[in-house]
Amino acid sequence: MDHGEKLFWLSVLIQRRYAQICAEFDLTPSQATLLCAIRNEPRQMAYLAASLGMTKNALSQLVDRTERRDLVSRVGSEHDRRVVLLDVTPAGKALAEAVFAETSRRLPDVASGLDAADQRDLERIAGAIVDAPGARTPLS
């Protein structure tokens, strides 16, 4: 298996673990990611679409589904009436914090088969990848 294929399967493993965690909170991975992205402050819809790699239409549909569950709300900007911001409701905030904490706690389990030195190496390398110029979306 070459490097690209290994990264592909690592991605599948991480996505599968994340989906399991989200399901325990009765959320889709997309809903959980959306909630976590806005848990600390409201964000513009256009900004979220670009940051999450979604079309505006797809984001709008995701927001509609999440809004029906009273987890997010659309609010107008105080500075520009044309801008729509997305914010978490109190229930959405509590759920986002719980999902984020559980994901942060359990996602490292994907490396549980590694010895301590390899786990530290993986943490260092993952940090270097995430912190590399241009690697992060505008949500970082």
Image: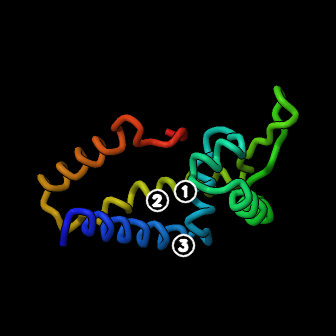
- State yes or no: discs 3 and 2 in contact (Cβ < 8 Å): yes
- State yes or no: discs 3 and 1 in contact (Cβ < 8 Å): no
> Which residue lies most toward the right here?
81
User: What's under tag 3, amino acid-wise?
Assistant: Glu
Q: Is residue 101 toward the left or the right of residue 55 in the image?
A: left
Q: Which residue is mark 2?
A: 102
Other residues around mark 2 within 10 Å, as few (<14) / some (14–19) / many (≥20): some
User: What's under tag 1, amino acid-wise?
Assistant: Ala
Foreground of the two, 134 or 128: 134
Q: Earlier in the sequence, mark 3 or mark 2?
A: 3
Identified at 41% across, 54% down, the residue is: 104
Asked which secondary structure carries label 1, the reply is helix
Q: Which residue is mark 1?
A: 98
Instruction: Give how far apart the Cα atoms at labels 3 and 1 are.
Output: 11 Å
Identified at 41% across, 38% down, the residue is: 134
> Which residue lies most toward the top here?
79
- State yes or no: discs 2 and 1 in contact (Cβ < 8 Å): yes
Q: Please provide percent x and percent y for residue 38.
A: 63, 45
Instruction: Give how far apart the Cα atoms at labels 2 and 1 are.
Output: 6 Å
Identified at 35% across, 38% down, the residue is: 131
Q: Please provide percent x and percent y for residue 14.
A: 38, 65
State the image quarter where residue 46 is shown.
top right
* Mark number displayed over residue 24: 3
Q: Is residue 57 above or below residue 80?
A: below
Instruction: Give how far apart the Cα atoms at labels 3 and 2 are.
Output: 10 Å
Identified at 50% across, 54% down, the residue is: 100
